[in-house]
Image: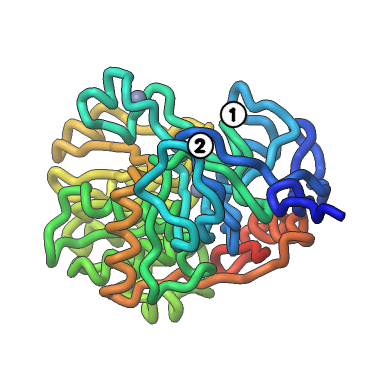
């Protein structure tokens, strides 16, 4: 009697069938990679706030049912035709950058991060809330041996976003850098800013995270509930960079006056609400506001290597894949300490 091939065996998947729908745990056939693709046996997948785009259908053009997840760590399980750079058994990840076309004007300029046809796992195709996933080979990130899967996964979105935003912010060693929000992004931002040699001011609402912020590497903690945080930053000379991580446009707007001369508000906390700023606020002190989205797989590898070198790690809570709904609720509640990671 013929035994079924591994490639056609069922696997568990956490999918959303419509915008606003609940998570369903279902069985599917294990997908087969086509030319240029790699199949990954998923070991861990972080739950990111941006998964709300898939869950609630806030991103245009999502086809349902869809499996969310763009913080994937796993092992190469099979490679499609024409893939020579990745081998079966290799530890890899996939982050927000889920593949570029290599042919659009941005790609031809080498700006793969801004590919006009950028694919995002969990949005453009099924992501990491499943036991096996297929991704384009040019989306893959090599994971160093010293990083375990559950730590590597959040570094592929939360980690790279904070790391890349900070390293491109223009702040120099010794500069005052404020990190707004002590959550999934912010707790990494504080650690990274400290390791980059900045004077770090952590800005949070309430005093409960003060001790933790200092433990993570903040020099100063500013409670934006009980003080005027912008004024506190000005007392320290004004921030060269404010890394805005908490998805609150109001909180970001309130901090702009805390920027020093030539200071920059670097926005990575994603919301749809407008940031409010007057031209006078920008003109006086020549301040700028800039957004930053993740980065390329090569940037992700830089992030992982820096984490390996510096000891920066995410603080995580793990949930099994079967409890994806619970894990997602935990992330949405804002009470997770600090990244939720699904294990397969
Ligand atoms: Zn993300
Ligand atoms: Zn492109």
Q: Relative to 229, does residue 211 appear above or below in the rendering?
A: below
Q: Is residue 247 visible?
A: no
Mark 2 touching mark 1, by CB under 8 A? Answer: yes
Q: Which residue is mark 2?
A: 120
Q: Secondary structure at mark 1?
A: loop
Kindly identify the residue that appears in the image at 60 percent across and 55 percent down.
47
Q: What is the number of the mark on residue 59?
A: 1
**Residue 98 percent location from the top left of the image:** 46, 39
Query: Quick check: 290 left or right of 47?
Result: left
**Percent of width and height locating residue 66:** 70, 36
CA distance separating discs 2 and 1: 11 Å
Q: Measuring 37% from the left and 43% from the top, which residue is drawn there?
A: 267
Quadrant containing the C terminus is bottom right
- Between 197 and 234, the one lying in front of the other is 197
> Which dot, 2 or 1, sits closer to the camera?
2
Q: Position of residue 319 (x, y in %)?
A: 69, 67
């Amino acid at each position: 009697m013929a035994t079924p091939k591994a490639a056609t065996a069922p696997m568990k998947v956490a999918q959303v069938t419509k915008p606003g729908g609940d998570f369903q745990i279902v069985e599917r056939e294990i997908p087969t990679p086509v030319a240029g693709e790699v199949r990954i046996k998923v070991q861990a997948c972080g739950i990111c706030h941006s998964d709300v785009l898939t869950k609630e259908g806030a991103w245009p053009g999502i086809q349902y049912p869809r499996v969310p997840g763009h913080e994937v760590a796993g092992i190469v399980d099979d490679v499609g035709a024409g893939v020579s750079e990745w081998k079966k058994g290799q530890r890899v990840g996939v982050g927000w950058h889920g593949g570029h076309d290599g042919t659009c004007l941005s790609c031809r300029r080498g700006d793969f991060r801004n590919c006009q046809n950028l694919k995002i796992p969990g949005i453009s195709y099924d992501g990491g809330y499943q036991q096996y996933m297929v991704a384009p080979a040019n989306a893959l990130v090599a994971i160093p041996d010293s990083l375990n899967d559950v730590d590597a996964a959040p570094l592929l979105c939360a980690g790279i976003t904070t790391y890349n935003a900070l390293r491109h912010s223009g702040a120099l060693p010794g500069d005052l850098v404020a990190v707004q929000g002590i959550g999934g992004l912010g707790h990494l931002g504080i650690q990274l800013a400290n390791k980059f040699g900045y004077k770090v001011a952590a800005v949070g609402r309430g005093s409960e995270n003060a001790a933790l912020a200092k433990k993570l590497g903040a020099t100063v903690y500013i409670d934006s509930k009980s003080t005027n945080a912008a004024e506190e930053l000005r007392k320290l000379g004004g921030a060269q960079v404010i890394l805005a991580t908490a998805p609150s446009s109001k909180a970001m707007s309130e901090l702009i006056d805390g920027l020093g001369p030539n200071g920059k508000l670097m926005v990575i906390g994603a919301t749809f609400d407008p940031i409010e700023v007057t031209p006078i606020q920008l003109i006086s002190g020549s301040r700028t506001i800039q957004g930053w989205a993740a980065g390329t797989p090569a940037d992700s590898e830089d992030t992982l290597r820096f984490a390996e070198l510096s000891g920066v790690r995410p603080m995580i809570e793990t949930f099994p894949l079967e409890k994806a709904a619970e894990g997602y609720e935990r992330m949405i509640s804002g009470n997770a300490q600090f990244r939720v990671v699904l294990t397969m």
